[in-house]
Image (spheres, rainbow, N blue to C red):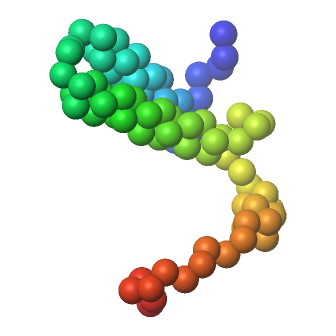
Amino acid sequence: MAAELPESDPCHHTRNIATMLDAVINHVRGDIGKISDPKAQALLGTTAEVLTGLKTALEHYEGPGGRPPDAAEEAAYARSTPAAPEVAGFEE
């Protein structure tokens, strides 16, 4: 069993939230089969997908080493990520 992280560690919170999201995702997916309304099924399917994306984002926060990326890793990622194109109407 993994050691308990201190409450001051952000990963303590991201792991707890990811676990809670996993439970909600499973519940929502289970509910899809319990209803016959196609719009409601689509809504619940979309809900599960969005929550899965949030859970993935939380898991990516820790990175492959099970910890948040350090400043050097963040800088390397920023250099490797292409700049977003300008979108009309959203200039600063």
* Residue closer to the observer: 3 or 29: 29
Observer-nearest of 67 and 30: 30
Q: In the picture shown, does residue 80 fall above or below 48?
A: below
Q: Looking at the rendering, which quadrant does residue 83 occupy?
A: bottom right
Residue in view at x 20 percent, y 15 percent: 36
Quarter placement of the N terminus: top right
Image quadrant in which you'd find residue 9: top right
Is residue 69 shown above or below 45? below
36 in relation to 18, above or below: above
**Is residue 18 in view from this perspective?**
yes
Q: How many numbered marks does the figure carry? A: 0
Where residue 37 sits: x, y (%)? 18, 22
Where is residue 81 drawn, in percent x and y? 73, 66
Q: Is residue 37 left or right of residue 76?
A: left
State whether residue 13 is above or below residue 32.
below
Residue under the point 77% across and 36% down: 65
Residue 85: quarter of image: bottom right
Task: Identify the residue shown where x is 72% and y is 71%.
Answer: 82
Judge from the rendering whether residue 35 lies leftward or rightward of residue 21; answer left or right.
left
Q: 55 left or right of 42?
A: right
Q: Quadrant of the C terminus?
A: bottom left
The residue shown at (50%, 39%) is 53
Question: Quick one: 91 or 72, which is closer to the camera?
Answer: 91
**Residue 14, visible in the rendered structure:** no
